[in-house]
Amino acid sequence: MLDPRKATDALSSRINRLLYRQLIDFDSRFQPIPDLAEWQQLSAKHYRFSLIDESFFPDGEQLNAEDVAATYRSVLDKGLGSAHRGSLKHIRAIEVINDKQLDFYLSHEDALFVGRLVIGILPAKMIAQNHQFQALPIGSGACEFIAMSEQKLQLKRRSDGVELAFIPVKDATVRVLKLKKGELDIIQNDLSPELVQYAAKQPQLQVDYHYGTGFGYIGFNFEDPLLSQLALRQAIAHGIDRQAVIDAVFSGRARLAGGLLVPKHWCGVEDMPQYDYNPSLARQLIKQVIEQIKKRSEIRPELAGLIKKSQSGQEVIELSYKTSNDPTRIRLATIYQSQLKPLGIHLKIQSYDWGTFYNDIKQGRFQLYSLAWVGVKSPDIFQYVFASNAIPPQGANRGRYRDQLADDLIAQASQTEDLAEQAKLYKRLQKRLQATLAAMPLWYEDQYAVSRNNISGYQLYADGRLDGLLRVQKN
Protein backbone atom coordinates (compact mmCIF):
# COMPACT_ATOMS: atom_id res chain seq x y z
CA MET A 1 0.00 0.00 0.00
CA LEU A 2 1.84 3.10 -1.27
CA ASP A 3 -0.69 5.64 0.01
CA PRO A 4 0.78 6.52 3.45
CA ARG A 5 -2.67 7.48 4.77
CA LYS A 6 -3.85 3.90 4.33
CA ALA A 7 -0.69 1.84 4.83
CA THR A 8 -0.60 -0.21 8.04
CA ASP A 9 1.76 -3.13 7.36
CA ALA A 10 5.48 -2.91 8.11
CA LEU A 11 6.74 -3.35 4.53
CA SER A 12 4.49 -0.62 3.11
CA SER A 13 5.50 1.76 5.89
CA ARG A 14 9.19 1.11 5.19
CA ILE A 15 8.86 1.73 1.46
CA ASN A 16 6.72 4.82 2.04
CA ARG A 17 9.56 6.29 4.13
CA LEU A 18 11.57 6.35 0.90
CA LEU A 19 8.81 8.03 -1.13
CA TYR A 20 7.46 10.58 1.33
CA ARG A 21 8.66 12.96 4.04
CA GLN A 22 7.04 13.16 7.47
CA LEU A 23 6.91 15.88 10.08
CA ILE A 24 8.81 13.98 12.78
CA ASP A 25 11.06 10.98 13.28
CA PHE A 26 12.35 9.18 16.39
CA ASP A 27 15.69 9.06 18.19
CA SER A 28 17.39 5.96 19.62
CA ARG A 29 15.12 6.06 22.69
CA PHE A 30 12.03 6.39 20.46
CA GLN A 31 11.35 9.97 21.45
CA PRO A 32 10.08 12.33 18.70
CA ILE A 33 12.65 14.50 16.93
CA PRO A 34 12.21 16.97 14.04
CA ASP A 35 12.25 15.70 10.46
CA LEU A 36 10.44 18.14 8.18
CA ALA A 37 9.39 20.35 11.07
CA GLU A 38 10.12 21.43 14.60
CA TRP A 39 7.34 22.24 17.04
CA GLN A 40 6.25 24.30 20.01
CA GLN A 41 3.55 23.31 22.47
CA LEU A 42 1.78 26.61 23.01
CA SER A 43 -0.76 25.14 25.43
CA ALA A 44 -1.96 21.72 26.53
CA LYS A 45 -4.08 21.44 23.38
CA HIS A 46 -2.29 23.72 20.93
CA TYR A 47 0.83 22.80 18.90
CA ARG A 48 2.63 24.92 16.30
CA PHE A 49 4.78 23.23 13.66
CA SER A 50 7.37 25.11 11.61
CA LEU A 51 8.89 23.57 8.48
CA ILE A 52 12.67 23.63 8.79
CA ASP A 53 13.74 21.61 5.76
CA GLU A 54 13.12 22.32 2.09
CA SER A 55 11.49 19.40 0.33
CA PHE A 56 10.23 19.21 -3.24
CA PHE A 57 7.69 17.09 -5.10
CA PRO A 58 8.65 15.56 -8.48
CA ASP A 59 7.06 18.45 -10.39
CA GLY A 60 9.38 20.94 -8.66
CA GLU A 61 6.74 22.34 -6.29
CA GLN A 62 8.05 22.90 -2.77
CA LEU A 63 6.25 21.16 0.08
CA ASN A 64 4.51 23.71 2.28
CA ALA A 65 2.17 23.98 5.25
CA GLU A 66 -0.93 23.66 3.04
CA ASP A 67 0.30 20.20 1.96
CA VAL A 68 0.72 19.16 5.59
CA ALA A 69 -2.74 20.43 6.52
CA ALA A 70 -4.39 18.80 3.49
CA THR A 71 -2.73 15.46 4.26
CA TYR A 72 -3.93 15.34 7.86
CA ARG A 73 -7.38 16.70 7.05
CA SER A 74 -7.80 13.90 4.51
CA VAL A 75 -6.77 11.31 7.11
CA LEU A 76 -9.47 12.68 9.42
CA ASP A 77 -12.08 12.46 6.66
CA LYS A 78 -14.29 9.42 7.39
CA GLY A 79 -14.81 8.94 3.66
CA LEU A 80 -11.14 8.08 3.13
CA GLY A 81 -11.34 5.17 5.56
CA SER A 82 -7.83 5.65 6.94
CA ALA A 83 -6.83 3.24 9.72
CA HIS A 84 -4.79 6.10 11.21
CA ARG A 85 -7.85 8.25 11.86
CA GLY A 86 -8.35 6.70 15.30
CA SER A 87 -4.90 7.66 16.60
CA LEU A 88 -5.45 11.25 15.39
CA LYS A 89 -9.03 11.57 16.62
CA HIS A 90 -8.16 14.33 19.11
CA ILE A 91 -7.31 16.80 16.32
CA ARG A 92 -10.09 19.41 16.45
CA ALA A 93 -8.75 21.83 13.86
CA ILE A 94 -5.72 22.54 11.66
CA GLU A 95 -4.96 26.14 10.73
CA VAL A 96 -2.29 27.24 8.24
CA ILE A 97 -0.45 30.39 9.34
CA ASN A 98 1.85 30.78 6.32
CA ASP A 99 3.82 28.59 3.92
CA LYS A 100 6.10 27.42 6.72
CA GLN A 101 3.86 27.25 9.79
CA LEU A 102 0.61 25.64 10.86
CA ASP A 103 -1.23 25.01 14.11
CA PHE A 104 -2.89 21.84 15.40
CA TYR A 105 -5.69 22.25 17.94
CA LEU A 106 -6.77 19.25 20.02
CA SER A 107 -10.07 18.46 21.68
CA HIS A 108 -8.29 16.58 24.49
CA GLU A 109 -4.81 16.70 25.98
CA ASP A 110 -2.53 14.08 24.46
CA ALA A 111 1.07 13.80 25.68
CA LEU A 112 1.89 11.44 22.80
CA PHE A 113 0.42 13.67 20.09
CA VAL A 114 3.67 14.72 18.39
CA GLY A 115 4.75 11.09 18.02
CA ARG A 116 1.56 10.34 16.08
CA LEU A 117 2.46 12.70 13.21
CA VAL A 118 4.30 10.15 11.07
CA ILE A 119 2.08 10.17 7.97
CA GLY A 120 3.94 10.88 4.73
CA ILE A 121 3.00 14.32 3.37
CA LEU A 122 1.12 14.46 0.04
CA PRO A 123 0.69 17.44 -2.32
CA ALA A 124 -2.51 19.31 -1.47
CA LYS A 125 -3.48 19.90 -5.09
CA MET A 126 -3.37 16.17 -5.83
CA ILE A 127 -5.45 15.38 -2.75
CA ALA A 128 -8.05 17.88 -4.01
CA GLN A 129 -8.12 16.00 -7.33
CA ASN A 130 -8.70 12.64 -5.55
CA HIS A 131 -5.45 11.36 -6.98
CA GLN A 132 -4.90 7.60 -6.54
CA PHE A 133 -1.61 7.62 -4.66
CA GLN A 134 -1.58 3.83 -4.37
CA ALA A 135 -1.34 3.52 -8.17
CA LEU A 136 0.95 6.52 -8.72
CA PRO A 137 2.71 7.70 -5.53
CA ILE A 138 3.73 11.35 -5.50
CA GLY A 139 5.86 12.39 -2.55
CA SER A 140 8.85 14.54 -1.66
CA GLY A 141 10.98 11.75 -0.21
CA ALA A 142 14.49 10.67 -1.13
CA CYS A 143 13.11 8.35 -3.85
CA GLU A 144 10.78 8.87 -6.77
CA PHE A 145 8.28 6.33 -8.07
CA ILE A 146 8.98 4.90 -11.54
CA ALA A 147 6.66 1.94 -12.11
CA MET A 148 4.92 -0.96 -10.43
CA SER A 149 3.69 -4.36 -11.61
CA GLU A 150 3.12 -7.76 -10.06
CA GLN A 151 6.75 -8.60 -10.84
CA LYS A 152 8.51 -5.45 -9.66
CA LEU A 153 8.30 -2.10 -7.86
CA GLN A 154 10.76 0.44 -9.28
CA LEU A 155 11.95 3.57 -7.49
CA LYS A 156 14.73 6.04 -8.32
CA ARG A 157 17.02 7.74 -5.84
CA ARG A 158 16.80 11.48 -6.34
CA SER A 159 20.35 12.11 -5.20
CA ASP A 160 22.06 10.14 -7.98
CA GLY A 161 19.37 8.57 -10.19
CA VAL A 162 20.18 5.01 -9.11
CA GLU A 163 17.22 2.67 -9.63
CA LEU A 164 15.97 0.53 -6.75
CA ALA A 165 13.91 -2.53 -7.71
CA PHE A 166 11.83 -4.49 -5.19
CA ILE A 167 11.14 -7.98 -6.53
CA PRO A 168 8.77 -10.37 -4.74
CA VAL A 169 10.10 -13.93 -4.49
CA LYS A 170 7.86 -16.05 -2.27
CA ASP A 171 10.12 -19.05 -1.78
CA ALA A 172 13.04 -18.30 0.57
CA THR A 173 15.36 -20.88 -0.99
CA VAL A 174 14.74 -19.46 -4.47
CA ARG A 175 15.51 -16.01 -3.05
CA VAL A 176 18.97 -17.13 -1.92
CA LEU A 177 19.66 -18.91 -5.22
CA LYS A 178 18.74 -15.77 -7.15
CA LEU A 179 21.07 -13.81 -4.88
CA LYS A 180 23.91 -16.24 -5.65
CA LYS A 181 23.27 -15.91 -9.41
CA GLY A 182 23.26 -12.11 -9.23
CA GLU A 183 19.56 -11.77 -10.03
CA LEU A 184 19.12 -10.08 -6.64
CA ASP A 185 21.54 -7.87 -4.71
CA ILE A 186 20.15 -7.71 -1.16
CA ILE A 187 17.74 -9.73 0.97
CA GLN A 188 16.71 -8.19 4.28
CA ASN A 189 15.22 -10.61 6.84
CA ASP A 190 12.56 -13.27 6.07
CA LEU A 191 14.97 -16.18 5.67
CA SER A 192 15.25 -19.23 7.87
CA PRO A 193 18.29 -19.26 10.19
CA GLU A 194 19.61 -22.25 8.22
CA LEU A 195 19.51 -20.28 4.96
CA VAL A 196 21.28 -17.32 6.58
CA GLN A 197 24.00 -19.64 7.84
CA TYR A 198 24.26 -21.20 4.39
CA ALA A 199 24.58 -17.77 2.77
CA ALA A 200 27.33 -16.78 5.21
CA LYS A 201 29.46 -19.65 3.87
CA GLN A 202 29.11 -18.66 0.20
CA PRO A 203 32.15 -16.81 -1.17
CA GLN A 204 30.08 -14.37 -3.25
CA LEU A 205 27.75 -13.41 -0.38
CA GLN A 206 28.01 -11.52 2.91
CA VAL A 207 25.77 -11.28 5.98
CA ASP A 208 25.41 -8.24 8.24
CA TYR A 209 23.52 -8.05 11.53
CA HIS A 210 22.02 -5.33 13.72
CA TYR A 211 20.16 -5.66 16.99
CA GLY A 212 16.39 -5.55 16.52
CA THR A 213 13.34 -4.35 18.44
CA GLY A 214 10.72 -6.78 17.09
CA PHE A 215 9.03 -8.43 20.09
CA GLY A 216 8.40 -12.16 19.74
CA TYR A 217 5.87 -13.67 22.13
CA ILE A 218 3.57 -16.58 22.89
CA GLY A 219 -0.07 -15.58 23.20
CA PHE A 220 -2.58 -17.16 25.58
CA ASN A 221 -6.36 -17.39 25.29
CA PHE A 222 -7.66 -16.03 28.59
CA GLU A 223 -11.14 -17.36 27.90
CA ASP A 224 -9.78 -20.90 27.94
CA PRO A 225 -10.49 -22.71 31.27
CA LEU A 226 -6.90 -23.95 31.44
CA LEU A 227 -4.89 -20.96 30.24
CA SER A 228 -6.95 -18.52 32.29
CA GLN A 229 -5.04 -19.96 35.26
CA LEU A 230 -1.88 -17.99 36.04
CA ALA A 231 -0.10 -21.09 37.38
CA LEU A 232 -0.33 -22.82 34.00
CA ARG A 233 0.95 -19.76 32.14
CA GLN A 234 3.82 -19.57 34.62
CA ALA A 235 4.56 -23.27 34.10
CA ILE A 236 4.86 -22.71 30.35
CA ALA A 237 7.09 -19.67 30.87
CA HIS A 238 9.40 -21.57 33.23
CA GLY A 239 9.27 -24.72 31.10
CA ILE A 240 10.62 -23.23 27.86
CA ASP A 241 14.38 -22.63 27.74
CA ARG A 242 14.39 -19.44 25.68
CA GLN A 243 18.16 -18.94 25.71
CA ALA A 244 18.73 -22.48 24.48
CA VAL A 245 16.30 -21.79 21.64
CA ILE A 246 18.11 -18.55 20.76
CA ASP A 247 21.44 -20.35 20.71
CA ALA A 248 20.20 -23.37 18.74
CA VAL A 249 17.83 -21.76 16.24
CA PHE A 250 19.12 -18.20 15.88
CA SER A 251 22.81 -18.86 16.56
CA GLY A 252 22.62 -16.36 19.39
CA ARG A 253 21.28 -13.60 17.11
CA ALA A 254 18.47 -12.48 19.45
CA ARG A 255 18.11 -11.06 22.96
CA LEU A 256 15.82 -12.31 25.71
CA ALA A 257 12.75 -10.08 25.95
CA GLY A 258 11.07 -8.87 29.10
CA GLY A 259 8.44 -6.56 27.66
CA LEU A 260 6.93 -5.34 24.42
CA LEU A 261 9.10 -2.20 24.53
CA VAL A 262 12.88 -2.66 24.54
CA PRO A 263 14.61 -1.57 27.78
CA LYS A 264 16.21 1.52 26.20
CA HIS A 265 12.82 2.89 25.11
CA TRP A 266 11.92 6.00 27.11
CA CYS A 267 9.11 3.93 28.64
CA GLY A 268 11.11 0.69 28.72
CA VAL A 269 11.78 -1.33 31.88
CA GLU A 270 15.45 -2.15 32.41
CA ASP A 271 14.89 -4.30 35.53
CA MET A 272 11.95 -6.33 34.26
CA PRO A 273 11.52 -9.55 36.29
CA GLN A 274 12.24 -12.58 34.11
CA TYR A 275 10.73 -16.06 33.97
CA ASP A 276 13.95 -18.06 34.05
CA TYR A 277 14.09 -21.62 32.79
CA ASN A 278 13.15 -23.75 35.80
CA PRO A 279 11.70 -27.15 34.86
CA SER A 280 11.36 -28.25 38.51
CA LEU A 281 9.18 -25.27 39.32
CA ALA A 282 7.23 -25.83 36.10
CA ARG A 283 6.43 -29.41 37.15
CA GLN A 284 5.22 -28.23 40.55
CA LEU A 285 2.98 -25.61 38.95
CA ILE A 286 1.50 -28.16 36.53
CA LYS A 287 0.71 -30.55 39.40
CA GLN A 288 -0.89 -27.63 41.22
CA VAL A 289 -3.10 -26.89 38.21
CA ILE A 290 -4.12 -30.53 37.86
CA GLU A 291 -5.09 -30.75 41.55
CA GLN A 292 -7.12 -27.54 41.33
CA ILE A 293 -9.00 -28.85 38.30
CA LYS A 294 -9.77 -32.10 40.11
CA LYS A 295 -11.24 -30.20 43.04
CA ARG A 296 -13.31 -27.95 40.81
CA SER A 297 -14.55 -30.94 38.80
CA GLU A 298 -16.33 -32.21 41.92
CA ILE A 299 -18.70 -29.27 41.46
CA ARG A 300 -18.36 -29.01 37.67
CA PRO A 301 -17.90 -32.55 36.30
CA GLU A 302 -17.29 -31.29 32.78
CA LEU A 303 -13.87 -29.97 33.91
CA ALA A 304 -12.61 -33.50 34.54
CA GLY A 305 -12.10 -33.90 30.81
CA LEU A 306 -9.38 -31.25 30.86
CA ILE A 307 -6.97 -33.72 32.44
CA LYS A 308 -5.61 -36.41 30.13
CA LYS A 309 -3.59 -39.57 30.68
CA SER A 310 -0.36 -40.22 28.83
CA GLN A 311 0.55 -43.67 27.51
CA SER A 312 2.54 -44.23 30.69
CA GLY A 313 -0.49 -43.35 32.82
CA GLN A 314 0.82 -39.92 33.85
CA GLU A 315 -1.75 -37.16 34.28
CA VAL A 316 -1.01 -34.46 31.72
CA ILE A 317 -2.49 -31.30 30.25
CA GLU A 318 -3.04 -31.16 26.49
CA LEU A 319 -2.96 -27.82 24.69
CA SER A 320 -3.16 -26.83 21.03
CA TYR A 321 -0.50 -24.50 19.63
CA LYS A 322 -1.27 -22.67 16.38
CA THR A 323 1.39 -21.31 14.07
CA SER A 324 1.93 -20.40 10.44
CA ASN A 325 3.37 -22.97 8.04
CA ASP A 326 6.69 -21.11 7.92
CA PRO A 327 9.39 -23.79 8.47
CA THR A 328 11.19 -21.81 11.17
CA ARG A 329 7.97 -21.23 13.12
CA ILE A 330 7.11 -24.93 12.90
CA ARG A 331 10.60 -25.81 14.11
CA LEU A 332 10.20 -23.49 17.09
CA ALA A 333 6.86 -25.11 17.88
CA THR A 334 8.39 -28.57 17.91
CA ILE A 335 11.12 -27.36 20.29
CA TYR A 336 8.51 -25.98 22.68
CA GLN A 337 6.67 -29.29 22.36
CA SER A 338 9.76 -31.32 23.25
CA GLN A 339 10.69 -29.07 26.19
CA LEU A 340 7.20 -29.10 27.73
CA LYS A 341 6.31 -32.77 27.23
CA PRO A 342 8.53 -34.16 30.05
CA LEU A 343 6.98 -31.61 32.40
CA GLY A 344 3.39 -32.76 31.81
CA ILE A 345 2.19 -30.43 29.03
CA HIS A 346 1.53 -32.05 25.67
CA LEU A 347 1.34 -29.58 22.79
CA LYS A 348 -0.66 -30.39 19.69
CA ILE A 349 0.88 -28.32 16.89
CA GLN A 350 -1.49 -26.97 14.24
CA SER A 351 0.12 -25.14 11.31
CA TYR A 352 -1.80 -23.23 8.65
CA ASP A 353 -1.20 -20.88 5.75
CA TRP A 354 -0.76 -17.31 6.94
CA GLY A 355 -4.27 -16.10 6.08
CA THR A 356 -6.03 -18.95 7.88
CA PHE A 357 -3.69 -18.77 10.88
CA TYR A 358 -4.02 -15.00 11.31
CA ASN A 359 -7.79 -15.07 10.94
CA ASP A 360 -8.06 -17.76 13.63
CA ILE A 361 -5.96 -15.64 15.98
CA LYS A 362 -8.11 -12.54 15.43
CA GLN A 363 -11.27 -14.59 15.98
CA GLY A 364 -9.93 -16.10 19.22
CA ARG A 365 -9.90 -19.66 17.82
CA PHE A 366 -6.77 -20.84 19.64
CA GLN A 367 -5.29 -21.85 22.97
CA LEU A 368 -1.66 -20.90 22.30
CA TYR A 369 -0.02 -19.12 19.37
CA SER A 370 3.11 -17.16 18.61
CA LEU A 371 3.60 -13.90 16.70
CA ALA A 372 5.74 -10.77 16.88
CA TRP A 373 5.14 -7.04 17.11
CA VAL A 374 7.49 -5.06 14.86
CA GLY A 375 8.16 -1.36 14.42
CA VAL A 376 6.53 -0.35 17.73
CA LYS A 377 7.56 3.13 18.85
CA SER A 378 4.68 4.62 20.85
CA PRO A 379 3.58 3.26 24.27
CA ASP A 380 -0.06 3.69 23.30
CA ILE A 381 0.40 0.22 21.77
CA PHE A 382 -0.64 -1.08 25.20
CA GLN A 383 -4.15 0.33 24.78
CA TYR A 384 -4.40 -1.39 21.40
CA VAL A 385 -3.02 -4.75 22.55
CA PHE A 386 -3.97 -5.23 26.20
CA ALA A 387 -6.95 -3.03 27.12
CA SER A 388 -10.13 -4.98 27.86
CA ASN A 389 -12.05 -2.77 25.41
CA ALA A 390 -9.60 -3.61 22.56
CA ILE A 391 -10.76 -7.15 21.82
CA PRO A 392 -10.98 -7.60 18.00
CA PRO A 393 -12.37 -5.94 15.98
CA GLN A 394 -12.02 -2.95 18.36
CA GLY A 395 -8.30 -3.57 18.77
CA ALA A 396 -5.63 -6.27 18.88
CA ASN A 397 -6.27 -7.80 22.31
CA ARG A 398 -6.33 -11.22 20.66
CA GLY A 399 -5.89 -13.15 23.90
CA ARG A 400 -9.01 -11.57 25.41
CA TYR A 401 -6.87 -10.39 28.35
CA ARG A 402 -8.86 -8.57 31.02
CA ASP A 403 -7.27 -7.00 34.09
CA GLN A 404 -8.70 -4.06 35.99
CA LEU A 405 -5.35 -2.76 37.25
CA ALA A 406 -3.89 -2.90 33.75
CA ASP A 407 -6.94 -1.03 32.40
CA ASP A 408 -6.58 1.61 35.12
CA LEU A 409 -2.87 2.14 34.37
CA ILE A 410 -3.54 2.38 30.63
CA ALA A 411 -6.25 4.99 31.28
CA GLN A 412 -4.12 6.98 33.73
CA ALA A 413 -1.14 7.01 31.37
CA SER A 414 -3.24 8.16 28.43
CA GLN A 415 -4.70 11.03 30.49
CA THR A 416 -1.36 12.21 31.93
CA GLU A 417 0.21 15.22 30.25
CA ASP A 418 3.59 15.00 32.01
CA LEU A 419 5.87 12.63 30.07
CA ALA A 420 7.97 11.68 33.09
CA GLU A 421 4.86 10.68 35.02
CA GLN A 422 3.55 8.91 31.96
CA ALA A 423 6.77 6.89 31.71
CA LYS A 424 6.37 5.80 35.35
CA LEU A 425 2.81 4.64 34.69
CA TYR A 426 3.76 2.71 31.57
CA LYS A 427 6.62 1.03 33.42
CA ARG A 428 4.22 -0.01 36.19
CA LEU A 429 1.87 -1.30 33.53
CA GLN A 430 4.56 -3.41 31.88
CA LYS A 431 5.49 -4.99 35.20
CA ARG A 432 1.81 -5.77 35.76
CA LEU A 433 1.55 -7.36 32.33
CA GLN A 434 4.64 -9.42 33.12
CA ALA A 435 3.36 -10.46 36.55
CA THR A 436 0.04 -11.65 35.07
CA LEU A 437 1.72 -13.05 31.94
CA ALA A 438 -0.58 -11.20 29.57
CA ALA A 439 1.71 -12.70 26.95
CA MET A 440 4.89 -14.72 27.33
CA PRO A 441 7.91 -12.68 26.20
CA LEU A 442 10.32 -14.60 24.00
CA TRP A 443 13.01 -12.44 22.40
CA TYR A 444 13.97 -9.48 20.24
CA GLU A 445 15.27 -10.98 16.99
CA ASP A 446 18.23 -9.32 15.26
CA GLN A 447 17.84 -7.62 11.91
CA TYR A 448 20.04 -9.01 9.14
CA ALA A 449 20.83 -8.47 5.49
CA VAL A 450 22.33 -10.96 3.05
CA SER A 451 23.95 -9.29 0.05
CA ARG A 452 26.43 -9.90 -2.73
CA ASN A 453 30.06 -8.99 -2.09
CA ASN A 454 29.93 -6.10 -4.55
CA ILE A 455 27.39 -4.32 -2.35
CA SER A 456 28.80 -1.78 0.13
CA GLY A 457 27.50 0.84 2.52
CA TYR A 458 24.19 -0.85 3.33
CA GLN A 459 23.12 0.11 6.85
CA LEU A 460 20.65 -1.85 8.96
CA TYR A 461 18.35 -0.29 11.55
CA ALA A 462 16.82 -1.74 14.71
CA ASP A 463 13.24 -1.24 13.48
CA GLY A 464 13.86 -2.83 10.07
CA ARG A 465 13.49 0.35 8.01
CA LEU A 466 14.95 0.32 4.51
CA ASP A 467 16.73 3.69 4.71
CA GLY A 468 20.05 1.93 4.04
CA LEU A 469 19.00 1.81 0.38
CA LEU A 470 19.52 5.56 0.18
CA ARG A 471 23.31 5.21 0.52
CA VAL A 472 24.13 1.67 -0.61
CA GLN A 473 26.48 1.27 -3.56
CA LYS A 474 26.95 -1.51 -6.11
CA ASN A 475 30.56 -1.79 -7.16
Image: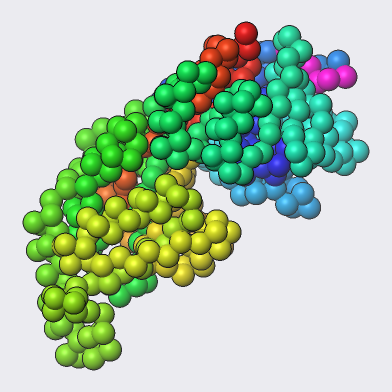
Between 22 and 69, the one nearer to me in the picture:
22
Q: Where is residue 168 in the image (x, y as percent from the top left)?
A: 66, 38
Q: Which residue is drawn at 73% across and 52% down?
A: 81
Picture quarter with the N terminus: top right
Q: Please state the total of marks drawn on the protein image.
A: 0
Q: Position of residue 91 (x, y in %)?
A: 64, 41
Q: Which residue is drawn at 39% across and 45% down?
A: 216
Q: Residue at x 87, y 33 (%)?
A: 126
Picture quarter with the C terminus: top right
Observer able to see residue 86 = yes
Between 280 and 17, the one nearer to me in the picture:
280
**Which segment did they paint magenta?**
54-59
Between 33 and 324, the one nearer to me in the picture:
324
Where is residue 7, by image quadrant? top right
Is 340 magenta? The answer is: no
Asked whether, in this view, residue 140 is left or right of residue 108, the answer is: right
